[in-house]
Structures are given as C-alpha cells and as structure tokens.
C-alpha cells in the first residue's frame, strides 16, 4: 500500500524515476524481490529487482482492486491500483459530504519471494521435528527405564521359574521392590518349599518303590530259578536220600557184622583162655612143664588178642573224638617197617609168605609219630597176610617224592577188594564182601589208619587193586615240621 501511494507521483508525471526511491525502500524488505509500476494504459514505468517468472496481463483485464493476482511456485504476485485523488481505494473521508469518485492512474506490481517463507517453514518444521524427536527420545528412555524397573524383577522371577521347571527344587526368590513383587516372591518361595517337600517325599517313595521292585524281581528270578531247577532239586534230594538210606543200610549192615565179628573175636580168645586155664588146672599134676608152658602161652596170646581188640576200639573212639595225642619225631621210616615186619615173622613162616622191602637204598629222616605210623603199617601188613594165600609174595615199597613227602605201599597177591568197595572199607566196622565170612577181624584197622594218616599227619591213604591181582594199600605223609 505504501509503495502504491509513493508511486502516485511517478504515475502522474509518467516517469518511473520519481518512484525509484520508494522502489528501493520496498525492495529492502526481506521477502520483496521485484517491484514494477504500470500506467493505466499498461505501460511499464518502473521495473526493479530480480527477474520474475510471471508478467501481469494487459491492464483492462486487471481487477480494480488490489490483492494477490497470481501465485507461482516461487513467488506471490500482488497488484495494487493507484488512484489520482490521493486517496486509497475505498478510502473515504468521514467528513466529506460529496462523494468524489477516485480516478485510476495505474498499478503497482510487487513480487514477494516464497523462498524465505519456505526457509521459515523448514526452520519451523525442523525445530518442531527436533524438539519432537528429543521429547520422544526422552519419553522413550523414560518408558524403557520404567518398563525395566517393572519387568526386571519379573524377568528374574521368570528365570527362577525356568530353573524350577528344569528340575531345580532349591531355588528361592529374593525379589525386592513393590508390595506386589514381595507378595509374588513370597508366594513363589512358598510354592517352591511345598514343591521341594513333595519332591523329597516322592523321591523317598520312589526309592522305596524301586527297592521293592528290585526285591520282587529278585524273588521272581529266584522263583523262576527254583521252578526251573525244582525237578533237579527233587532229583538231587532224592539221590541224597537214596545215598543216605544206602549209607544207613551199609552202616546197619556193618554194625550187625561188627557185632557178629566182635562177639566172635571176643569169644574166640576168651574161649581159648578159659579152655587152656581149665586144662591147666585139671592136668596140673599130670602134664609136663612144657605142656603147662604151652597152656600159659595160649592163655597169654588170647589175652593179648583181647587186649589188642580193646585197644583198637579205644583208639578209634579217641581218634574220632580228636583226643588222640601224637608224638612227632624225625625218624627213618625203614626202621619202623623192619620193626613191624619182625613182629610178623612167625605168621609169615606159618603161611610161607615172603616179604620184600624195596628200599632203593635211599634213607631219609622224616617227621612222623613212629608208634602211630607203626600201627598203620602193622594193620596193612596184617591185612595183606590175612587176605593172601599161602606161598605168596608181599612187597613193601617206600618212595620219597619230589615234594619231600614219603609214600609207603603194601602190595599182596590176595583176594583183592571189589572196585565199588575201595572207599567204603575205610568206614568203621566195614569189611569187603569178599572177606566177610572167613578171615576174622572187626573192621577197625583201616578207619584207624585213615584217622592217623589224614588227621594226624595231613596225608592220604587209599586202596587199589593190582592189575596182576591182589591189593595195593598206599599212604602218603607230607613233609612235616619237627615238633
Ligand atoms: N589186603 C587186603 N586184601 C583184601 N581185602 C582187604 C585187604 N585189606 C583190607 N581188606 C578188607 O577191608 C576190610 C577192613 O579191613 P580192616 O583192617 O579195617 O579190618 P579187619 O582187618 O577186618 O579187622 P581188624 O583190622 O580190625 O582186625 C577187611 O575186613 C577186608 O575185607
Ligand atoms: Mg585189619
């Protein structure tokens, strides 16, 4: 408006230079980039400022009022009419009585640059955006902080729950914070305690169940084994029973035989003693001294036989009760053999039996109870003589073994022993089925030998039949330490 007023003079005189100063002043405003003045015929009187992208149309098409005439991308084009009266359009004095019609003398064209506005817009937008961004960032940070503050304890609790889910029962929460958190933490801990107790109880029950199952399994296995082996067990027990019955029968038979033998063995010497004693008494004055001596000899022999029998019985009971005492010494067993064989001289002569001792000229001193081993050799030789025919041969062999033990065997050419009785003849009162009737004896000799060798000297004794006929009785005594 001001530029339009200041252009009046230039338009009245038709000379643009009159408005040059006003144009410079107007261009001095920040957004004004171009000013121009047109007279009413449309002639350009003044044109100042930067080049423009729009030229106003010829004057008749201009509107008679001022305002925004056109808008381009970069500028607004304002056109304002200039009137001669010196009054502005529509401007009337309140004191004027006559209405004076203003006379249009030209136009001014002012171009306002949009770039400034755009810059301002951008600046405002940028400022707004920056502050909104900062505000949003602060809000976000605050939100995050608050969320973290609220969710951290929940996360911790969730982690504990996960541990609990994986089987840990001793996890406890120590959450601090709001009342709700504390309540939740306490509730969790209580739940875990109850869970822990239940788990322990369940573990115990489980272990007890497993034990019970294991026991049942074992019992079942045992039952299966029993079932599978029941027949075997029954057979075995039946066998045992049969063996026990047979053993009882054998023992009973042996006992009957023993009683029969014993009465025979007792009666024979007693009868001898009594007969020769009464002979002697009756014929005391009539018979010679030699005859009397013979009677006494018979009485003495029968007495000795009785004594030997009683000694055997006594020995066996002592040996069986483990009450027999031994006297171990270092001796030469050949010496013992010869002493025993001397005792049999008369009997051997009577049956014309020859005894050969195979010594191989080796003599060693070994540890044994001489009297007891002599008793063993005596019984073996006595049996050999008793069960051998006349004119036969008895061999006594002594062998020293590599393990320092000594073996002694007595072989004869007698009746032999049935194979299935080779063991049983070592039982008390047992006699082989081949010799029970005629040979005499009580069946105590070999059991006594067995006790002396096995218990008294930790050795062994056995009977075998020789291939060429007859029996071989062998015992072995290991090397013992001298007492
Ligand atoms: N050399 C042998 N030959 C054949 N049978 C034997 C021989 N030695 C032992 N026996 C058998 O073994 C049985 C038992 O012998 P053992 O010496 O124990 O008793 P015994 O000789 O009958 O009586 P005892 O020795 O008490 O006087 C004998 O009765 C006999 O049947
Ligand atoms: Mg005998």
Image: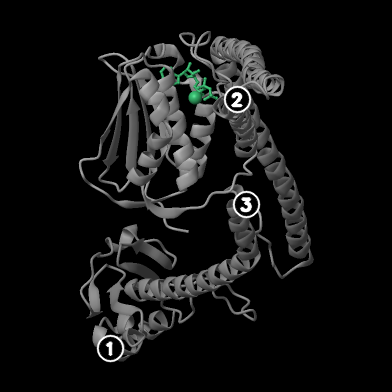
Q: Which residue is mark 3?
A: 164
Q: Residues within 10 Å of mark 1 (few under 14, many from 20)?
A: some
SS at badge 1:
helix
Cα–Cα gap, marks 2 and 3: 112 Å
SS at badge 3:
helix
Asked where in the image residue 6 lies, by quadrant, the reply is: bottom left
Quick check: is the Cβ at mark 3 less than 8 Å away from ligand 1? no
**x, y (%) of residue 230?**
58, 12
SS at badge 2:
helix
Q: Residues within 10 Å of mark 3 (few under 14, many from 20)?
A: some
Q: Which residue is mark 1?
A: 20
**Which marked residue is nearer to the observer: mark 1 or mark 3?**
3
Cα–Cα gap, marks 1 and 3: 92 Å
Q: Which residue is mark 2?
A: 295
Q: Residue furthest front?
A: 286
- What's the residue at 57%, 17% (across, down)? 224
């Amino acid at each position: 408006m001001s530029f339009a007023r200041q252009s009046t003079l230039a338009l009245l005189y038709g000379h643009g230079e009159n408005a040059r100063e006003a144009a410079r002043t107007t261009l001095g405003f920040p957004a004004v980039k171009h000013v121009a003045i047109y007279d009413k015929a449309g002639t350009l009187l003044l044109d100042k400022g930067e080049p423009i992208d729009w030229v106003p149309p010829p004057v008749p098409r201009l509107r008679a009022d001022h305002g925004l005439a056109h808008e381009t991308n970069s500028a607004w084009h304002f056109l304002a009419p200039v009137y001669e009266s010196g009054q502005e359009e529509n401007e009337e004095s309140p004191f004027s009585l006559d209405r004076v019609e203003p006379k249009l003398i030209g136009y001014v064209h002012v171009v306002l640059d949009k770039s400034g506005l755009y810059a301002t817009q951008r600046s405002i937008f940028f400022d707004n955006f920056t502050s909104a961004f900062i505000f949003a960032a602060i809000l976000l940070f605050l939100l995050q902080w608050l969320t973290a503050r609220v969710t951290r304890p929940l996360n911790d609790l969730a982690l504990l729950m996960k541990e609990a889910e994986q089987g840990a029962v001793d996890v406890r929460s120590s959450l601090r914070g709001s009342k709700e958190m504390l309540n939740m933490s306490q509730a969790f801990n209580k739940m875990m305690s109850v869970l822990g107790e239940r788990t322990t109880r369940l573990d115990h029950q489980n272990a007890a169940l497993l034990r019970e199952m294991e026991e049942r399994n074992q019992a079942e296995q045992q039952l299966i084994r029993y079932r599978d082996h029941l027949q075997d067990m029954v057979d075995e027990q039946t066998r045992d029973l049969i063996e026990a019955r047979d053993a009882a029968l054998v023992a009973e038979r042996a006992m009957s035989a023993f009683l029969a033998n014993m009465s025979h063995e007792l009666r024979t010497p007693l009868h001898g003693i009594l007969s020769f004693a009464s002979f002697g008494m009756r014929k005391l004055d009539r018979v010679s001294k030699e005859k009397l001596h013979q009677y006494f000899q018979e009485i003495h022999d029968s007495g000795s036989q009785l004594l030997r029998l009683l000694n055997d019985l006594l020995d066996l009971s002592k040996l069986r009760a483990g009450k027999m005492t031994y006297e171990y010494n270092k001796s030469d067993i050949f010496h013992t053999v010869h002493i025993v064989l001397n005792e049999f001289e008369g009997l051997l002569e009577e049956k014309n039996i020859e005894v050969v001792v195979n010594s191989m000229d080796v003599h060693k001193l070994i540890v044994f109870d001489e009297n007891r081993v002599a008793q063993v050799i005596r019984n073996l030789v006595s049996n050999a003589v008793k069960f051998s025919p006349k004119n036969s041969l008895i061999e006594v062999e002594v062998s020293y073994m590599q393990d320092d033990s000594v073996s002694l065997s007595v072989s004869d050419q007698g009746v032999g022993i049935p194979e299935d009785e080779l063991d049983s003849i070592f039982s008390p009162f047992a006699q082989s089925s081949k010799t029970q009737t005629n040979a005499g004896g009580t069946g105590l000799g070999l059991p006594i030998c067995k006790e002396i060798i096995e218990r008294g000297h930790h050795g062994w004794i056995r009977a075998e039949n020789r291939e060429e006929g007859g029996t071989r009785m062998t015992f072995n005594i290991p090397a013992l330490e001298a007492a």
